[in-house]
Image (tube, rainbow, N blue to C red):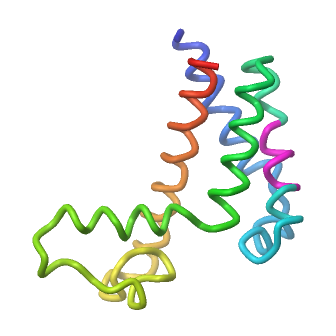
Amino acid sequence: MTALTALGILLAHLAGDYLLQSDWMAQEKTRRWWPAAAHALTYGLPFLLVTQSPAALAVIVATHAVIDRYRLARHLVWAKNFLAPRRYWHPWATCQATGYHPDRPAWLAVWLLIIADNTMHLAINTAAVHWL
């Protein structure tokens, strides 16, 4: 993969997730499938400039819809705590909103969740463009 392709993936992700996502999509995508699907489809549009592979585009759009609809990043954030000693484990009920324990400042938990979400999307998108 070239540096130009990697830059294209990053820029397509940023444009699709932040410039093309309406407030309606952002507010409703975790509650209903229609806003999640609308966001995923518009999210995929900038990737037409990066790849013309139908398989890669399908993976990018489909995984984006599922990750955002179910806020899967919070599950990843919570699950990674099991890599720590048992005393750092927290029940899911206390960490549902962001995956982080309520002791973590709310602003920090939200930003770390956004970073985890973006990392998940970028890893999947890069793999799809590279191998599909």
Return the x and y of residue 69 as percentages of the image width and height.
70, 65
The quadrant where residue 106 appears: bottom left
Q: Position of residue 21 (x, y in %)?
A: 80, 55
Residue 33 located within the stretch drawn in magenta: no
Measured from the top left, where is residue 119 in percent x and y?
48, 46
Q: Residue at x 79, y 50 (%)?
A: 40
Say left or right for 2 vs 47. left
Nearer to the camera, 34 or 49 = 34
Closer-to-camera residue (13/129): 129
Looking at the image, which residue is at 46% across and 76% down? 107
Vertical comparison of 100 with 82: above or below: below
Region in magenta: 38-44
Q: Is residue 39 magenta?
A: yes
Name the outermost residue toward the top: 2
The vertical placement of 69 against 2, above or below, is below
Count of marks placed on residues: 0
Return the x and y of residue 129 as percentages of the image width and height: 63, 22
Splitting the image into 4 quarters, where does residue 93 fall? bottom left
Q: Quadrant of residue 121?
A: top right
Q: Which residue is rendered at x = 73% and y = 54% of the image?
A: 65
Q: Residue at x 47, y 75 (%)?
A: 98
User: Which image quarter holds the C terminus?
Assistant: top right
Q: Main secondary structure of the magenta part?
A: helix
Above or below 101: residue 132? above
